[in-house]
């Protein structure tokens, strides 16, 4: 009997550099970037508050890679979801190396350095992965008159702080 396992990573952090968008020889887009996350704590012995920063290498493929290359910039706060992968590669100097990275499956732009927010992209919505459990497409929006739209309450936007309160860690 096979046992199940789980390889899922969820991060909220800031891009440390602009994404690097490139293409494989068979024209598949691949985008790589890095996210910094930080953690603060006070030692149990009552010492001074401490902080540690972790850097995570992220790689996106296909349409999601194109979107990351267009939307993301250094300093942007993003939610990234994917799976952890370790791979071996040979450097230009001929030395064997190993790297661990997160293969992006879902991305949400929380706050852009230009002040924009709330852009969401996922591998599933771009046909990269198909699942029998995929959500049904949203029904077409009904046409409304300009008068009715003005009468409705304005849509509130959420800030990164509002979202951070809902994150379970």
Image: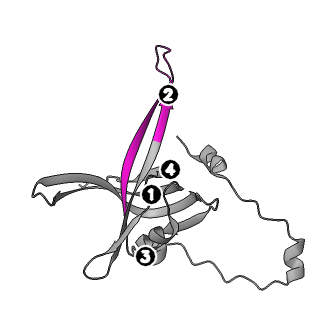
Residue that carries the numbered disc 1 in the rendered image: 81
Of mark 2 and mark 3, the one earlier in the sequence is 2
Give the vertical position of 24 relative to 163 (above or below).
Answer: below
Say whether marks 4 and 2 touch (CB < 8 Å).
no
* Residue 47 is inside the magenta segment: yes
Q: Which range is magenta?
A: 38-59
Residue that carries the numbered disc 2 in the rendered image: 41
Q: CA distance from mark 2 to mark 3?
A: 39 Å
Answer with left or right where residue 135 lies relative to residue 4.
right
Residue that carries the numbered disc 3 in the rendered image: 63
Question: Can you name the residue that lies furthest to the top here?
Answer: 45
Foreground residue among 86 and 7 = 86
Q: CA distance from mark 1 to mark 4?
A: 9 Å
Q: Which mark is residue 12?
A: 4
Say whether marks 2 and 3 touch (CB < 8 Å).
no
Identity of the residue drawn at 67% across and 84% down: 140
Q: CA distance from mark 4 to mark 3?
A: 21 Å
* Residue 130 is inside the magenta segment: no
Eye-nearest disc, 1 or 4: 4
User: Residue 18 placed where, x, y %?
Assistant: 44, 61
Answer with left or right where residue 33 lies relative to residue 144.
left
Foreground residue among 100 and 10 = 100
Q: Which mark is residue 50?
A: none
Answer with left or right where residue 51 lies relative to residue 62.
right
């Amino acid at each position: 009997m096979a046992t199940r396992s789980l390889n899922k990573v969820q991060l909220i952090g800031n891009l440390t550099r602009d994404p690097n968008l490139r293409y494989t020889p068979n024209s598949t887009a691949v985008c790589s970037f890095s996210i910094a996350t930080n953690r603060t704590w006070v030692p149990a012995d009552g010492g001074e508050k401490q902080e540690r920063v972790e850097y995570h290498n992220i790689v996106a493929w296909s349409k999601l890679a194109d979107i990351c290359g267009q939307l993301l910039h250094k300093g942007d706060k993003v939610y990234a979801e994917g799976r952890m992968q370790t791979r071996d590669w040979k450097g230009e100097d001929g030395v064997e190396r190993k790297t661990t990275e997160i293969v992006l499956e879902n991305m949400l732009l929380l706050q852009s350095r230009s002040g924009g927010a709330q852009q969401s992209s996922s591998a599933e919505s771009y046909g990269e992965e198909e699942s029998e459990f995929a959500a049904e497409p949203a029904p077409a929006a009904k046409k409304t008159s300009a008068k009715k739209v003005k009468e409705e309450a304005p849509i509130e936007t959420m800030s990164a702080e509002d979202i951070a309160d809902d994150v379970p860690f």
